[in-house]
Image (cartoon, rainbow, N blue to C red):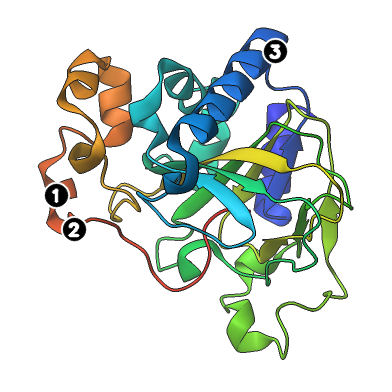
Amino acid sequence: MTPRETCRQLDDLGYALLPAVMDAALFSRLRERVQELFMQEGEAAGSEFKIEQGARRLANLVNKGAIFHEIILHPRVLPLVRHVLQGSVKLSSLNARSANPQRDTPQPLHCDMSALPDERGSWVCNTVWMLDDFTEDNGALRVVPGSHCWGRLPQEALADPLADHPRQRVITGAAGSVIVLNAHLWHGGLANRTTRPRTAVHAFYCRRDKPQQLHQRQWLAPDVQASLAPNLRELLALDDASNDADCGQHYVRSGFLGQ
């Protein structure tokens, strides 16, 4: 698809799959670093955000390597995030999630942060960097196209958000691809019924007038902050005094973030 067609799909359906966004070098370095961090952090992995039964998580990844700075600024992905958020963008959090093998429980349909659009429109956008193939058997993402426009949360509208939805689609694709998701869209990870984990990195963005899910100035080490180029500082809102108004350990509303 052309960039214009991709933007139209994001408007209409609420998601777009970008095949082969990562070249071999970027993919290899990203996957290697994620696996290193899982080994280094062990049972504490993801504790800056949350520990999740049935999955392994990493959090605060901007603090943990320059490879993560590359993906949040990626020239094919960030313009699409800007489109969803109408040009007003900052990084909210950067995490990884690995769905454990042989898990029978899917995620319920949800909107990230339990967020609904406000009078200005959409204010959350998620990007899913696929480090494994996404298949129907290993915990791929299911979505309900168009639900980002409905102005309702699935847990309020559905009798059982865990059940299949009659309009749902499953997004499958090859490792190295990226899913851009209007995060108001109803979505959820399927069960991983295979014998191998299914891993992805989630770069989650919000509109600049909203608080970050992980307050970057608080969590980034001083030497990391000092090393960042101006475009990264701007994306992380490090020099935005108004961003401190909602400073806290986490900004976590009820609901899920990430697949």
Q: Is residue 202 visible?
A: yes
Place of residue 169 in the rendered image (x, y in percent of width and height, measured from the top left): 85, 59
**Where residue 23 is drawn, which disc sits there?**
3
Residue under label 2, please give it: 246
Query: Residue at 42% of width from left, 42% of height from top?
Result: 59
Please identify the quarter of the rendering in which residue 201 is found. top right
Q: Residues within 10 Å of mark 3 (few under 14, many from 20)?
A: few
**Where residue 244 is drawn, which disc sits there?**
1
Place of residue 96 in the rendered image (x, y in percent of width and height, measured from the top left): 54, 41
Place of residue 1 in the rendered image (x, y in percent of width and height, measured from the top left): 80, 30
Callout 2 amino acid? Asp
Q: Residues within 10 Å of mark 2 (few under 14, many from 20)?
A: some
Locate residue 103 relative to residue 75 in the image: left or right: right
Q: Are marks 2 and 3 in contact (CB under 8 Å)?
A: no
Instruction: State how far apart marks 2 and 1 are (Cα).
Output: 5 Å
Locate residue 150 relative to residue 5 in the image: left or right: left
Location of residue 219 with respect to 163 vertically, above or below: above
Q: Are marks 1 and 3 in contact (CB under 8 Å)?
A: no
